[in-house]
Amino acid sequence: MELEFPVVLKKLEMMTDDESFLFCRANDSLELERDKYRNILILSPTGSKTGLRTVTLVGELYAWNKYNESGYVFDSSTGFKLPNGATRSPDVAWIQKERWDVIPEEQQEKFAPICPDSIIELRSASDDLKYLQDKMEEYRENGCRLGWLIDRKSQQVFIYRPQQPVEIVSSFTQELSGENVLTGFTFDLTLLTR
């Protein structure tokens, strides 16, 4: 029998935010999220190639941000508590410096109560596309200003912006623009084809 991910644990919806944080820490070998209904989701770890490509994304964004110094870059092990109550861990996230710096340090140490300004999700072989598209919509509804869902399987990128239709890029031979969110940042999609 093949297990479908994410696995939803529905009996845990009564956990407080602190209990959820402690539950995730106690089970740090699992990739866990919580949806807006407070269900705990067990996600599948990515394959090695997807992990390598995610590091490429993080590295490129980190290098731009180190020079730009306008915000902070977060990896896939970071949880954020969204305004709708969900706790999500995008593959790559970026938050504008001014927004992050006003969060009390105690909250920064847990699942910070903020939706990142920019999100990148890289679909792995075990990821359901519809689930990721719904997750990207959730980010957008909670304040994300620029989201990229990169699907290597179909060679497409779904670009999410507030109050705009999803744009689909159907070529991995071009660069993605950080637009007015990640000003001056571009990502060469051919880096994900190696």
Image (spheres, rainbow, N blue to C red):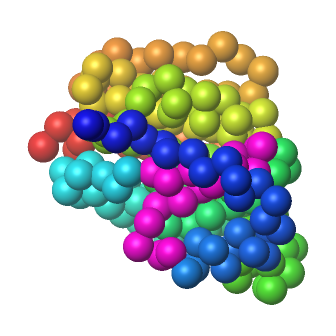
User: Looking at the rendering, which quadrant does residue 100 occupy?
Assistant: bottom right
Q: Is residue 36 left or right of residue 56?
A: right
Looking at the rendering, the stretch of residues picked out in magenta corresponds to 27-43
Q: Residue at x 82, y 59 (%)?
A: 14
Percent of width and height locating residue 125: 27, 37
Q: Residue at x 70, y 35 (%)?
A: 138
Up-down: is 166 above or below 80?
above
Q: Position of residue 188 (x, y in %)?
A: 31, 40
Q: From what the image shows, is residue 80 above or below residue 128?
A: below
Q: Is residue 93 visible?
A: no
On-image quarter of the N terminus: top left
Position of residue 39 in the picture relative to residue 83 (left or right) = left
Against 20, residue 43 (above or below) is: above
Q: Is residue 87 magenta?
A: no
The quarter of the picture where residue 32 lies is bottom right
Report the residue at 80% width, 86% height from top.
Answer: 106
x and y percent of residue 5 in the render? 43, 41
Give yes or no for residue 40 being in the magenta stretch: yes
Q: Visible in this render: residue 87?
A: yes
